[in-house]
Image (tube, helix red, strand yellow):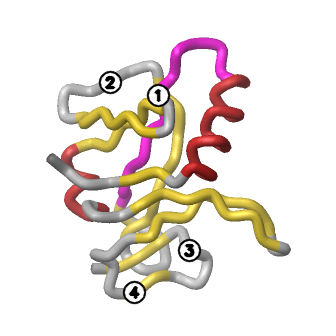
Amino acid sequence: MTNFKLTEHAAIRIKNLLKDEKSNSYFRISVLGGGCSGFQYDFSFTNIKNIDDKIFNEHGISFLIDEASIEFITGGKLDFVNELSGSYFKIDNPNASANCGCGTSFSI
């Protein structure tokens, strides 16, 4: 089983965002090429579960991560952070060798 976790803070934020969605959406976590460090995290909502998606359930939230993306973030966790500079989702990724200052991109 692939290991990826949500913190309770992330789950609460996702639940609040899902209230604004008009249908039974999934929260999707993806890793895309690009960003200032080579790869970047992407968070979105979707009604479609693709054939290569893994579905996770934690703290009452169903979320999707595709097979290619999970390779980059296995063992990680998603948190929601509230700081003076703003509020944002943050992935603690043990596979990243370097992170960008903005926290949304990384390299392996």
Residue at 57% in and 43% down = 11
Mark 2 residue type: Lys
Residue 21 position within the rendered picture, expressed as x and y whole percent measured from the top left: 65, 21
Disc 3 target residue:
103
Q: Secondary structure at mark 1?
A: strand
Is the C-beta separation of discs 2 and 1 under 8 Å? yes
Residue bearing mark 1: 26
Which three-letter amino acid code belongs to the residue tagged 4?
A: Ala
* Crowd tier of the residue under label 3, counting other residues whose Cα lies within 10 Å: few below 14, some 14–19, many 20 or above: some
For marks 3 and 1 on the same chain, the one whose residue lies earlier in the sequence: 1
Q: Which residue is mark 4?
A: 98
Q: Quadrant of the C terminus?
A: bottom left
Label 4: state its secondary structure: strand
Question: Could you say whether the residue bearing mark 3 is in a helix, strand or loop?
Answer: loop
- Badge 2 local density, few (<14 within 10 Å), some, or many (20+)? some
The residue beneath circle 2 is 49
Looking at the image, is 24 positioned above or below residue 43? above
Q: Is residue 108 left or right of residue 64?
A: left
Residue furthest to the left in view is: 1
Span of residues in magenta: 21-32
Q: Going by the image, does 89 lie left or right of 56?
A: right
